[in-house]
Image (cartoon, rainbow, N blue to C red):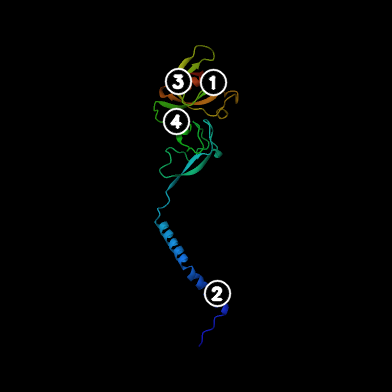
């Protein structure tokens, strides 16, 4: 039984495709070889390095700033390159020192016990100084002597020497000025010698606290 005849148009199309393939066989062979090489290289390539998520400052931040969601963002660090002491969710914490945009948020940048790491002789302690203008003269890292003065008169007495200024919370967050009838002044965070903690706590309630710079 004779085979059915292929229509001229289909036959012409088949011949045209064959001619095109033959004409470009070298190019097609090169493309196929290149794809095979790339596939092999991809199969042999090492896996992508592991990463860890790190919370960093979204923009420049000042010391004493209470962190809000817009102040931080999360980025990826290669495993082994992220700093120690990083804080995953620092929102609501207060900065003890200024931060630059992109700097990782670590415990050393936040108000807390970690501020006295490496100084076992000091205890982190918040102290309210009655005069906010006087407190505004302080800088993180200052060493000061705390003095207690009796509001009713009498000479001041030294209650602690060489306290370290660890943080200066933002004025509006610490209650500077008369927020009500009883809360005034400026809150500062000090590293106080352990032996003086009780004396400083008592003096901050009963006396007017001031300071001078340690010699």
Instruction: Identify residue for label 4.
Output: 115
Circle 4: element type: helix
Q: Mark 3 to mark 1: distance in Å?
A: 21 Å
Say which of marks 3 and 1 sits in front: 1
Q: Residues within 10 Å of mark 2 (few under 14, many from 20)?
A: few
Please tell me how many numbered marks the rendered image carries.
4
Circle 1: element type: helix
Question: Which residue of the protein is positioned furthest toward the bottom in this rendering?
Answer: 1
Left of 153 or right of it: where is 198? left
Q: Of marks 3 and 4, which one's residue comes earlier in the chain?
A: 4
Q: Is residue 90 above or below residue 164?
A: below
- In depth, the one of 9 and 118 nearer the eye is 9
Q: Which mark is residue 156?
A: none
Q: Mark 2 to mark 1: distance in Å?
A: 94 Å
* Residue under the point 53% across and 73% down: 16
Q: Mark 3 to mark 4: distance in Å?
A: 21 Å
Q: Of marks 4 and 2, which one's residue comes earlier in the chain?
A: 2
Q: Of marks 2 and 1, which one's residue comes earlier in the chain?
A: 2
Circle 3: element type: helix
Say which of marks 2 and 1 sits in front: 2
Q: Are marks 3 and 1 in contact (CB under 8 Å)?
A: no
Q: Which mark is residue 13?
A: 2
Instruction: Identify residue for label 1.
Output: 134
Residue 12 in picture, x, y percent from top left: 55, 76
Q: Which mark is residue 199?
A: 3
Q: Are marks 3 and 2 in contact (CB under 8 Å)?
A: no
- In depth, the one of 9 and 123 nearer the eye is 9
Q: Of marks 4 and 1, which one's residue comes earlier in the chain?
A: 4
């Amino acid at each position: 039984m004779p085979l059915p005849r292929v229509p001229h148009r289909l036959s012409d199309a088949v011949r045209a495709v064959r001619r095109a393939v033959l004409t470009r066989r070298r190019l097609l062979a090169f493309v196929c070889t290149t794809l095979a090489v790339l596939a092999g290289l991809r199969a042999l390539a090492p896996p992508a390095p592991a990463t860890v998520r790190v919370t960093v400052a979204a923009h420049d931040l000042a010391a004493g700033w209470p962190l809000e969601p817009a102040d931080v963002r999360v980025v990826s660090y290669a495993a082994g390159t992220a700093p120690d002491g990083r804080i995953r969710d620092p929102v609501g914490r207060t900065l003890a020192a200024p931060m630059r945009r992109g700097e990782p948020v670590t415990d050393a940048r936040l108000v807390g016990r970690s501020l006295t790491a490496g100084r076992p002789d000091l205890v982190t302690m918040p102290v309210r100084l009655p005069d906010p203008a006087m407190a505004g003269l302080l800088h993180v890292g200052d060493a000061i002597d705390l003095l207690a003065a009796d509001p009713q008169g009498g000479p001041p007495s030294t209650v602690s020497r060489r306290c370290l200024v660890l943080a200066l919370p933002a004025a509006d967050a610490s209650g500077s000025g008369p927020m009500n009838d009883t809360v005034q002044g400026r809150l500062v965070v000090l590293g106080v010698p352990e032996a003086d903690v009780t004396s400083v706590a008592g003096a901050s309630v009963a006396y007017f606290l001031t300071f001078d710079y340690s010699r």
